[in-house]
Structure formats: C-alpha cells, structure tokens
Image (cartoon, helix red, strand yellow):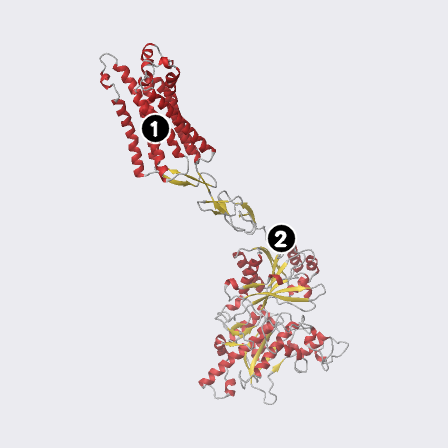
Amino acid sequence: MTPSSPEAVNTAFTTASADPESGRPDLEIKPETFCMAESVLQYYQHLLAFLFAIDEINTNAELLPNITLGYRIYDSCSSDIKSILSILSIISKKKEPVPNYSCGERGTLAGVIGDLSSDSTHSIARVTGIYKYPQISYGAMDPIFSDGIQFPSFYRTVPNERAQYEGIIQLLKHFGWTWVGIVASEDDSGQRATEELKREIIQRGVCVEFSVVIPDEFISNKIKIFHQAINIIRESTATVIILYSSRTYVMQEIMRTEWLEFAQKSEKVWIVSATLSIITDLGLDKAFLVINDTLAFSVSRGEIPGFQDFLSRVNPAMFPDDDLLKRFWNWNFKCNLPSTESVRNIAFPHNCTGNETLSSLGAVLFDVYNFRLSYSVYTAVYTLAHALHDMYSAQSQKGAFGNRENLLQDFQHWKLNAFLKKVHYKTAAGDEIFFDEKGETSVRYDILNWIYFPNGTLTNILVGSFNPSAPRDQQLLINDSSIEWQPGFTQIPPSSVCSDRCPLGYRKAPLEGKPACCFACIICALGEFSNGTDMENCLTCPEDQWPNDKRDQCIPKTIEFLSYQEPLGSALASIAILFSTITAGVLGIFIKYRDTAVVKANNRDLSFILLLALMLSFLCSMLFIGRPIQVTCLLRQTAFGLIFSVAVSSVLAKTITVIIAFNSTKPGSRLSKWAGSRVPNCLVLLCSLGEAVISIVWLLISPPFPDYDRQSETGKMILQCNEGSLIAFYSMIGYMGFLAGLSFVAAFLVRKLPDSFNEAQLITFSMMVFCSVWVSFIPAYLSTKGKYMVAVEIFAILASSAGLMGCIFIPKCYIILCKPHMNTREHLMEKPSFVSKKI
C-alpha cells in the first residue's frame, strides 16, 4: 500500500500461518508496486492504520488465536487497468497476474481491503465478485455499490453518498440558499453523482443555476472547456457552489492562474463533497485560495486507541523491509537514509539522522488528532478479522476440522460473506460496527470549515455534523457562530437566491422561461393575505375576518349597520319623529274641528284612520334603524306592510266614498243605499286583510332574521335583516303597489267632479307622489348594498307617507286654521274653494 498516488490505494491481506522462527506475518511491499516516489502524507497514514490494525489483531489472544494475518499491498494508481492487474496478481499470488490460476505457497487469501476511489473500487469489485472474494472499501461512496446483484460480496465502512445528498440539501435549507451552482469532475462517477444530486436538489425546491465540469488531462479540448467553466461561474449570480468530485485533479486544476485571478474578484461559498478527499500536500493546498472558507462534508472522525503513539514512533527501523517507508522518509525529510540508493530517485545533500518523526512534519500535514479515512481503514481490517474469527469459531464448534492446520488448508473464502453480513462488534473506542442488507454500515458525516490563512496555513474547524439515521429534525446540527465566512460578504450568513424573498403580504409569481426560484413578488389580491415569506399562494381570511392594510394577517371585520349614532341614521330618525309629530298635530286639529264642514265633507272616520296610519308609518321607520335583532327583523317589514296597506286602503276608500257620494245624489241612482260609513270601513278592513295574510304566510314559512352580509363591502360585515323569502317581500310590496294603483286610477277618474263635494284632486296628487316614490324605490333598492339599502327603504317610507299627509291634509288644515270663514257648509255649497282648480 502506498500513499504516493493522491487518489487511492487498494490493499489486500491474507490469512497465513505464523512463521515458526520469527513469528512475523507474511509481508510483501516492493518498490515496483508503487506509482511514484513522491508521496502524499495523508495516504501514507492510511497504510499505517492498516499496519497498526494488523499488528493489534496478531497480538490479540482473543481474536483469531494461533492465526497470523499477512498482507500484500498494491497501489491502484487511480487506474482501472492497474487496479485489475493488481487484484489478479493478489489472487494468482504471482508478480505477473495469471487469471484463474493460483500458485502461491504461503497463506490463504481471505479478502480485499480497498479502494479509496469509486472508479478503481469498481474495477476491483468486478473481479472479486466473480471469485466471491469479500471486498471492504474504506472510501468508495458511489451508490452503485449498494446493488447486491452486481456486487454480492462488496462491503464498505464509509456511507453511501446518497445520504450526503440529503445532508447537502438540509445545509442549503438551513441557510436559506435556493440558488446554487455545481462543479463536478469529468469522470463517470462524478457525473452520475452530480445528476442525482441535481435531481434531488430541484425536487426539494432549490434551483441550480449552472452545472459545469472540470475536464481532466485526457480531454482534447480541455483548455476551451476549462475557460468556459470559469466564465460560467464568473457570470453567475449564485453565491453558493457545490464542488462534487472524487478526483483530486479538480483541486490541481483549481490552482490554475485563471482560477486564482477569479478568486480575488468574487466571493463564493463552496460546499465540498466528502468524495473529494481534501488534499493537504503543500503543493495542492493553494487551491483553497479559490475555495477558501469552504464548508466540506467529511467522513466522521473516530478513535483509534494507541494509534497516535504508534505514529510518533514510526521510523524506517520499525519496518526494515518496507521500501515505501524509506522512499517516504527520503522525500519528506529531504535527506538520505543509509543503504537506500536503490529506492532513491533524488540524491539529497545530507543524510538522515534517524531522529526524525512523522509528527515533526506538523499537524496540518499529518493530522494525528482527527482520524477519518484512517479510521475507516482500521475498522475495515477489524471487521474482516471478526468475520474470520466467527467463521473459524463456527466451524470448530461443528467439528468440521480437527486442528488449526486443517482450518487453514480447507479455508473457503466465499463462505466468509455469510459471516460478514452478520458481523456485529464494538471497537475499542466503543463504536458499534455492523452491516445492513446492502453491505453498508451506519456512519455520520462531519461538516468542516476549511480556512486558508494569508501566511499559507491551512486548517479545518468542525462546525457541524449530519447523521442520516437520526430523526429528520435532528439529522443536521450546525454551529453557525463557529463558521468563518469570507470577509467580503456584506451579509452573514451570505445570501444565495435568484430573487429576494417575498415579504409578508406578497406571493410569488413565476417568471416565464426562468427556474422556479426566480420569481416576482406580487401583493396579495383584495381579500387575501400571506403570513409567511415566499408563499406560493395567498390565503383567504375566514368570513368574519379581513386582511389588514399590509395584508399579512387577518383582523376582525368591522360590523356595520344603520345606527342612531351616525349622521345618516340620526337624520332619518329625526325626520321620522318630526313627520310623526306633524301628523299627530294634524290628527289633533281634525279631532278638535271634527264637526266642521271641511272635516266632515269626506268621511272624517277615514281621515282619522289615515292620519293614524301615517303617524305609525313614520314611526315604523324607526324599526329599520339600530342594531338588527330577531324582534325588529320580524316586525319591520310586516309592520310597514300592514300600516301602509291600511293607509293606502283608506285613500282608496276615500276615493270610493267620493264616487258614491256624487252618484248617490242623482235621481234613481242605485248607489244611494251604499252611502254611509259602513262600506268604506269594510273596504279598509278587506284590503288590509290581504296584506295581513301575506305577512302571516311570510312569517310562518320563511321569516326574516338577523344576518351578516360579508360580501357587499370590503373589510366590513353588514349586520342586516335577511328577508328570508324575497318572493314574500316583493309580494308585500306588489300588493301595496296594487292598492296604490287602484287608488290613483280611481282618483284620477273622478278628479273633475264638483269641487265642493270631493277631495279627488288632492288624492290624485298624493297618489302621484306615492307611486313615484315607490317606483323609484325598486331600482334604488336593488342598486345599493348594506346600510344604504336600509336607508333607501326608510326614505321611501318617509317620502311616500309625507306625500300622502301633505297633499291630502295640509290644504284642509290651511282652511281650518287660516280661513275659518270658509269652513262652513254654506260656503262649501255656494263657492268653490281654493282647491277647486282644474288639473
């Protein structure tokens, strides 16, 4: 295993019998096994974690007793071909791979540990799957490995990256970022993951402004594509960019001059996926000049007891046969180890002292406090060891093998899969390790804030975590205050939206040809409100409420009715009382002068009935003013109808009296027997009875009741009397109109009779006024709403009543009070009065 490739290493170890002399495990690490001399320190730590786990297991008397684990290590070099050649070499146990052939003499291959990258892991898994060798990856997160049909013997100690999609989305939601860009690598794994992530992001209401790829060195038009990607990012309005890749060449490309110039002119928030291993080599950390203050998902750190001390003691003397360590030592400490000419690529000016330690390289270069992928390697080795232990224990209990040698000789690697699926143990640090039905273990992500300081120091701060197995509202934990943002941001945390959020009282309106996150804010329509930001649709208030002026909440509607306190109500009430008082005065005058000629001339009883009815008509209008209650609603229309029918019937009876009185004086007239007060009184009773029948039927079938009119006026509820049955209401008005029409026609026909004996002309004038008022009332009533509808009806009642009273009785009062000499029978018989002018 070598850290020389910045991509990954695939490793394998075999079960082997212990050497009877040295007790050392079977070890093979050769220089030609690796890709390059220079080494990336982070990956060498993975190798050391592997060696540390092997050493612990071999010295553990309870785990695989009397069995020593050996290993062979190959570097995949991030190459599919190299990966396949390496795994075939391991299986065939020869330097030159021989498919379907094994000629090794020592040890039995139990399983494969690795690889780090998904692409090389995929190549290895295709081969191991054919032979059913268990393979445990410590870095491959591609969701494709969850397919148990394609990869029946594959396991991993890192999470499926699909869980990371949800973590990224929740992180975007946490900060309110809805407008993002995606940068990915050119490889199939990066493209597939990017498309899935993009689909998940869009489904959750976040929009992707752009999605670009960073081409690798094998693309012919690499420079053109590279500059196009930079231009897209430069011209974008998205503040947040998701960098999703499993290839570290992306970090190398980011160090290009074009990127560095771009980084100095713009502020972006970068979210880096866990599949992109963070490079801390001095030659690559300058990439963080571009993606500084990055929020990065990372495999969660774990405890490896004793590993930190082990790292501090590592030196070439501990592994004298490890040529890789010698190369590593030469390269990183810039010195020459004795007797390492064969492994040196470059001659350094001085020799190594032997006192060098890995910890002296610095925590940034060699982190001995945060074991992440190293912990994944460590648990992978232990998981395979526990499965082997369970397998040997089960076979021993069944008596399948007589001794240790038989156990090793008759070992069948494919049976190990069944025990790996059931393995369940706790690490020394207390972490519980087991696989689910897809060969995956339950792990969480750490969220890191990578910071590149001006002095060239690169560090990371743990700012949160994401646990896919936790309850949904507890999966993402973020400490906002510990995040270091770029100093150029004017808003903390920075905003990344296509359109500013719609405030309360507004709704989002989509823009044609734009993503859903780009919208215009439109104020809610009349009668609607929105009590949240970025609402898709405005809400409707309950019927008894109305939006306030800002349209961000509902307030109770104003209850309105024609009250005595408002000017209109008090004015109408005052007029009603005034006219009622005048009518009462006229009635008093007629009673006082009841024996005079003018009063007696046209049936004084009918005059008294008419005056009383008019006085009550004025007063009944008071029922229409004030807060409607059940009693007033029942009385107002029925009282108005009955009283007016009495008044109109009295006028009709007066007209009939004139006709009878005039014609009864003619010789031989048959009407003489109808003269007197009985007929007019019966007529009044009969006509009023019709209105009474209509009112009673109305009250029995569908009586009026108090009701709220919530639609007529904006923001108001009109408290009014619901008529119950409009048919009954208009029947009442129609019947009254029918009586008025009869009175008008009769009066008009007898208007030219001798003036001394009739008041037909006065009745004609009064009925013209009455009919004009009520004909005008109908369209006015139907065109008004709320309390003004009530005011129109009151006005009609007052105007028509005043017309009857004024036209019929005021001229008579004038004669009674101002011209007493005309109020005699002789005068009426001899001289026409002032009211005898022809119409």
The single residue placed furthest to the right in the displayed view is 349
Q: Identify the residue shown where x is 28% and y is 15%.
A: 662
Q: Quadrant of the C terminus?
A: top left
Q: Residues within 10 Å of mark 2 (few under 14, many from 20)?
A: some
Q: Which mark is residue 644?
A: 1
Marks 1/2: CA–CA distance: 77 Å
Is 48 or 797 nearer to us in this picture? 797
Q: Is residue 727 above or below residue 374?
A: above
Tell me the residue that label 2 is attached to: 237
Picture quarter containing residue 494? bottom right
Q: Quadrant of the N terminus?
A: bottom right
Regarding residue 561, the answer to whether it shows in the image is: yes
The single residue placed furthest to the top in the displayed view is 830
- The answer to which of marks 1 and 2 sits earlier in the sequence is 2
CB atoms of marks 1 and 2 within 8 Å? no
The residue tagged with tag 2: helix, strand or loop? loop
Q: Where is residue 236? Give x, y as percent.
A: 63, 53
Q: Residues within 10 Å of mark 1 (few under 14, many from 20)?
A: many
Q: Where is residue 123? Give x, y as percent.
A: 56, 70
